[in-house]
Image (tube, helix red, strand yellow):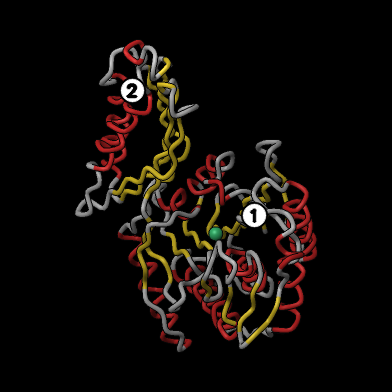
Amino acid sequence: MQHFQFDINKYLNELEMLVNIDSGSYDVDGVKKIAAYFESLYKELGWTVKYLDFDDRVGPCLEIRNTANEKIDILLTGHMDTVFPNGTSALRPFSIKNNRAYGPGVADMKSGLLSIYYAVKELNFDNFIKIPSICIALNSHEEISSAYSYEWIQQLATKSSYAFVLEPARKNGDLIRARKGILKYSLDLTGISAHAGVEPEKGISAITELGYWIMKLDQLTNYEMGTTLNVGLISGGTAANVVAEHASAVIDVRYTRVSEMKKLDEMFNHIQQHATAKGIISKINRVGFRPPMNPSEKGEDLIALANNIGKKLNIEFGWASTGGGSDANFISAEGVPTIDALGPIGGGTHGIDEYIELNSIEPRINLLREILLEVICNKLNTHS
Ligand SMILES: [Zn+2]
């Protein structure tokens, strides 16, 4: 058994500093500041820190390693971006009230980033036959579906034996075992405009066409299969007295079965080729994608291992399945046993009341650390 010191005040000071740096997904400078902070922490531990620039619109991602091995025994991931625009932390900076810490990104997931560091920094592998290879992947833009970094995450996953994602634990303390897949499509329709009073018969309304497809798409929701569609954004037309030339929609799809993805892609393809009104041109683009996260047999073993550690440490939690996505989706889809939501207990994410429970910080770091040690000692055959 290794023994660890934890200084909650130091942790909270660092968390305050991190929360008070705005780092929205497109705030390149803000994300760079967060990245620089973690770069210095891990370099002090003697780990290597690689910067990866995937696109000018977003900040750098960090790949942090303790060995030069290609293969990864333990993959730990978190994201440095938040959903909040620049200026948010000036309006409502980090604060502590009634045993909770508040502030933009405090739960989702600046505390998670710190907790990874605190969980690994004192791990001592001196008595091990082989030092386990750990990779910490800090994403710069998870909140926009990891649009430019998901292939990197997938590549890391293919090299990894086990993965842990530090999104916040649920309000009731639950960890996450499954997440729905997400597909996002944009639908753009072009018809022919005409004066609605003078010669409406010459027009072809893109709005009418869109209305037809909205009704059709709604019918594809199938709660039993776990597939839901939401036409969440629509726009179109220029004036009430003009037959609309353009109309568009953005559709968010959640699904649990991989087979559904193909069906949905086919359905959207069908829309593209089968406009109801002659002369309508449809364009469909898939603008977002996360595969579903469902535990494999090995994933269930890892869940059982975590349950045992929880009992040993006297930390209570259950397991949630959620419709929201994270990078755990990409990792788990590569067949890697993955546990998500190992950060502190929190709630109100993406909103003004976002918080974490202060008295969950240390227990959850201990939980993560003990899970890592158990996996390293008993699953990876590295122990002497
Ligand atoms: Zn998050």
Measuring from the top left, give residue 154's x and y in whole percent.
50, 44
Above or below, 247 relative to 84: above
SS assignment at label 1: loop
Q: Is residue 198 left or right of residue 66?
A: left
Q: Quadrant of residue 246?
A: top left
Residue under the point 72% across and 58% down? 22
Residue at x 41% of width, y 85% of height: 311
Task: Look at mark 1 in the image and give the residue it sits on.
Answer: 81
Residue 57 falls in which quadrant of the image? Answer: top right
Name the one closer to the observer, 242 or 351: 242
Residue furthest left as drawn: 224
Residue picked out by circle 2: 272
Label 2 vs label 1, nearer the camera: 2
Q: Nearer the viewer, residue 228 or 205?
A: 205
Residue type indicated by callout 2: Gln
Q: Residues within 10 Å of mark 1 (few under 14, many from 20)?
A: many
In terms of secondary structure, where does tag 2 sit? Answer: helix
Residue ID at (64%, 56%) = 84
Q: Is residue 215 left or right of residue 175?
A: left
Disc 2 crowd rating (10 Å Cα; few below 14, some 14-19, many 20+) is some
Q: Is residue 126 visible?
A: no
Mark closest to the chain's N terminus, 2 or 1: 1
Query: Visible in this render: residue 281?
Result: yes
